[in-house]
Image (cartoon, helix red, strand yellow):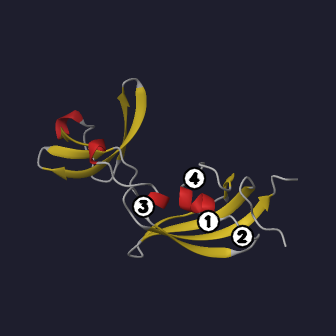
Amino acid sequence: MNLVQAGDRVEIHYAVRLADGSPFYSTQGEAPQAFLAGSDEVIPGLSRGVVGMQAGERKLLALEPQDGYGPRDPALERRVRLSELPSGVRAGERLEASLHGESVSLWVRSIEGDSALLDANHPLSGHSLILEIELVSFVSSSR
């Protein structure tokens, strides 16, 4: 029986739920996600979680923030005047900004009165996650 080892190229389908069971994302109906097991191409808990699996196997992973998208960093949040943002922007929308010549993804966390709270943290930072994964296939790095 062949089992995934660190360094193997894997393809998975997965669904992400928040700790309270709320669905966040699923690859259902999409192409499988491919990455190297044990690498930093995906979140740490997922990368380590596929090691030891076999093709066709399903697994449930409960991840703490440090194994997912990390803790929230309050330094990555900033309140700005609504007039500085595109007209009609709503809470939950993603924006792109330039910071020191580099593109940064921001989320509009909330809008209160004439200001908005922008956040450069990943939307899942600070959250415990539940991942349902299915290992579709893998190619051993030793072949």
Q: Residue furthest left?
A: 113
Write down the residue under mark 2.
53
Q: Distance between the residues labelled 4 and 3?
A: 14 Å
Q: Label 2, label 1: how many angstroms apart (C-alpha)? A: 8 Å
Please provide percent x and percent y for residue 38. Answer: 65, 55
Query: The residue under label 2 is which amino acid type?
Result: Met
- Quarter containing the N terminus: bottom right
Q: How far apart are marks 4 and 1 (CA)?
A: 11 Å
Q: What residue type is labelled 4?
A: Val
Observer-nearest residue: 9 or 107?
9
On the image, numbered disc 3 is attached to which residue? Answer: 65
- Residue 55 screen position, x and y as percent: 77, 69
Tell me which label, 2 or 3, sits earlier in the chain: 2
Residue 56 appears left or right of 69: right
Type of amino acid at the residue the image marks with label 3? Pro
User: Nearer the viewer's eye, disc 4 or disc 1?
Assistant: 1
Mark found first going from the N terminus, 4 or 3: 4
Spot occupied by residue 107 in the image (x, y as percentages of width and height): 34, 47
Disc 3 to disc 1, C-alpha distance: 15 Å
Specify the quadrant of the image occupied by residue 13: bottom right
Residue drawn 61% across the image and 65% down it: 49
Residue type, numbered disc 1: Gly
Label 3 packing within 10 angstroms: few (<14), some (14-19), many (20+): some
